[in-house]
Image: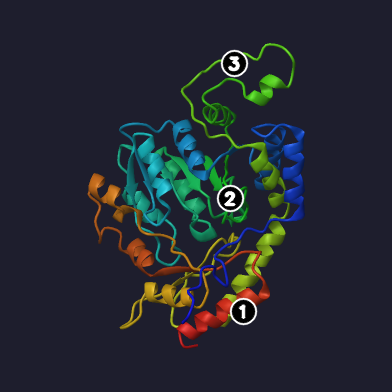
Amino acid sequence: MSIARTVPLVPFSPPEIGRDEIAEVIATIESGWLSTGPRVSRFEAAFAEFTGASHAIALNSCTAGLHLSLLAAGVGPGDEVITTPLTFCSTANVIVHCGATPVFADIDPITGNLDPAAAAAAITPRTRAIIPVHYGGRPADVLAFAALARRHGLMTIEDAAHCIEGVGAGRRIGTTADFTSFSFYATKNLTTGEGGMVTTESADAADRIRIMSLHGMSRSAWTRYQRLGPSRYDVVTPGFKYNMTDLQAAIGVHQLAAIGRHHDRRAAICQQYDEAFADLPFSTFAPLPEGDVHARHLYTILVDPIPGRDRDDVAVALGEAGIATSIHFQAVHLHRFYAERYGFCRGMFPHAERVADTVLSLPLSPALTDGQVGEVIRAVCAVFGG
């Protein structure tokens, strides 16, 4: 009798945590200061320097960053925000949390990113902002969206959950929009377990996001307790509990220091996949334009169905071979809440739906060994008869 595999031979995206991160966490614990404090400030400064942004605000998630960016941009009830249906649900959820209406526009089928022309066609007098998503780590057309925003007086808020190392049109992601939100979730290219960061060029917006991220308080605990004396504060707006802790930042500062080495490893794995899969019967997205840098967060294939085999069949077969996979993403407009609340249905965004129906993400992480990469290649080739 065979025994079902409970732990994959090759995990999907294991974090690469080194001795420096572990030592910094221990030092943080021993310091006696665990919540938002000096290590968060250090992480913010390093991230701002890395991206070239004027301001970086550390938060507890990319979702929090998108939410606070929308609020800082003045988005509220009666407004519309345009985004892609090929994204994680949080991109749209935060629009709803602001009291605004999410408006989807289809993707460019050769990139997987929001199509600027489709976004332009979706603009109405109520449109207040656009949220392009850098899908899988591929930079969106930042110049087209910047021009579109200028032409219509809109704010651009980039969802860069996948795109920390990305460069679009010669500029680092984080400096190409009014606001950019990054994710440091466990599977992301830079992880703090949970966490996020917002970058912006606006000092006023950065101050507002910082205040809103900690209950709307005028002074953080670290600011209040650095000096002896009264620790009074004022609440200037009804804020949220979105702050990052020093325990998270302790991991983040060393993850950021290793980001180049980790990106090189991801790129090398992707190249091995490209070469091994060149003749297999599935498609991928088009190469990047010259000057752009792919963050290499996901390695996706598009498995068009044939009799007896579709994407889900391939995922099951790879799982049985011990290879973990994932789907990025189910089309947001077809989730029950969005379909019922806003009347979205299949057929409205055919390019996004085709990707959502056929996409499969393969294991990708700097923590993968050469042997594990070889196992992925062997299993994929076996499933497709290569």
Q: Residues within 10 Å of mark 1 (few under 14, many from 20)?
A: some
Dot 1 or dot 3: first in sequence order is: 3
Confirm whether residue 169 shows in the render: no
> Residue flagged by tag 2: what amino acid is it?
Ile
Q: Residues within 10 Å of mark 3 (few under 14, many from 20)?
A: few
Q: Residue at x 76, y 54 (%)?
A: 19
What x and y, as percent, mark residue 243? 57, 34
Q: Residue at x 38, y 76 (%)?
A: 313
* Residue situated furthest front in the rendering: 1
> Residue flagged by tag 3: what amino acid is it?
Tyr
Tell me: residue 207, above or below residue 284. Answer: above
For the residues carrying marks 3 and 2, which lies nearer the camera in this image? 3
Distance between the alpha carbons at the discs numbered 3 and 2: 35 Å
Q: Any mark on residue 195, and which?
A: none
Please report contact status of discs 1 and 2: CB closer than 8 Å, yes or no: no
Distance between the alpha carbons at the discs numbered 1 and 3: 57 Å
Tell me: residue 351, above or below residue 71. Answer: below
Please give the residue where the numbered disc 3 appears in the rendered image: 233
Tell me: residue 351, above or below residue 177. Answer: below
Q: Any mark on residue 173, and which?
A: 2
Please report contact status of discs 1 and 3: CB closer than 8 Å, yes or no: no
What x and y, as percent, mark residue 318? 47, 76
* Residue situated furthest bottom in the rendering: 385
Secondary structure at numbered mark 1: helix
Please give the residue where the numbered disc 1 appears in the rendered image: 374
Give the side of residue 69 with respect to residue 248, left or right.
Answer: left
What x and y, as percent, mark residue 301? 46, 72
Dot 3 or dot 2: first in sequence order is: 2
